[in-house]
Amino acid sequence: MGAPYFRAVLGSPTGGDVWRSRQTGGMDKASVDSDPVAQLTRWLEAARSADQTMPEAMAIATATAEGRPSVRMVLLRGIDQRGLVFYTDRESDKGRELEANPHAAALFHWFKPLHRQVRVTGAVEEVEDALSDAYWRSRPSGSRRSAVASRQSSVVKSREELEERTAALAEEFPDEADLPRPPRWGGYRVLPETVELWEEGPDRLHDRLRYRRHAGNWVLERLSP
């Protein structure tokens, strides 16, 4: 089967040509912020204002010391000039991979208000304990109990075992504020070295702009789609 089949069956999740007609008609260097974190924040806020589902969702790709990659979805929980922050179990697959190879790639993908994506690559560091503690305290009690009961990525006999551990924690710590953050759970910060903006264009002539660090400054350049 040829390309027409895939266009007919898969199509565009937002309405094909109707969706493409909503594009801006061009993204150039003059239309974006000179700082990539500020520009990413701008697009993130635009997606949130347009009611994009879970605009903070981002894919995080890591790799083992041998270079074997893996990727999964996480939630962006902080962004500033230092980088992008997310939280997880540091004994999970991604935590072990980040310990062995402290670099990652992040990807955001939105359909609202426009079809866009942002790629970020860079080194990764653990966030400060105080920041992990503050975010831990902000989480719902059920999420905290689940994080303690589940040793992420490890083999478990059954779901019932997880539920029993969680119930036991609820009895041991009836006051939701008392459950402490386990040392294995905390945040990571992706330190941007390259940031790429992508916006859909007509006839697949998409716009791609890339920021890359050079001698302590950001260089902005256009890439072929």
Image (cartoon, rainbow, N blue to C red):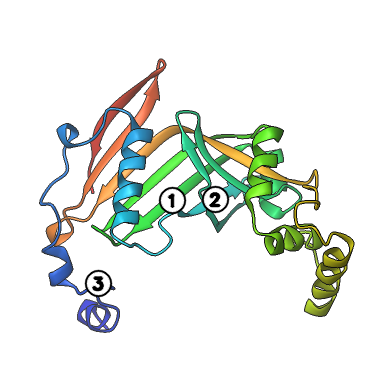
Residue type marked 1? Leu
Q: Distance between the residues labelled 2 and 3?
A: 26 Å
Q: Residue at x 71, y 39 (%)?
A: 99
Residue bearing mark 1:
107
Which secondary structure lies at badge 3? Answer: loop
Q: Which residue is drawn at 62% across and 40% down?
A: 188
Is residue 215 rendered to the left or right of residue 99? left
The picture places residue 130, in percent across and down from the top left corner, at 69, 33
Q: Residue at x 65, y 59 (%)?
A: 140
Is residue 60 rendered to the left or right of residue 102? left
Is residue 174 rendered to the left or right of residue 11? right
Residue bearing mark 3:
14
Q: How far apart are marks 3 and 1 (CA)?
A: 20 Å
Which secondary structure lies at badge 2? Answer: strand
Quarter of the image that includes the N terminus: bottom left
Of all residues shown, which one is farthest toward the front? 175
Residue type marked 3? Thr
The picture places residue 163, in percent across and down from the top left corner, at 80, 74
State which tag comes first along the sequence, 2 or 3: 3
Q: How far apart are marks 1 and 2 (CA)?
A: 8 Å
Q: Of the residues tagged 2 and 3, which is closer to the observer? A: 3
For the question of whether residue 87 can be seen, the reply is yes
> Marks 1 and 2: CB-CB under 8 Å?
yes
State which tag comes first along the sequence, 3 or 1: 3
Residue bearing mark 2:
61
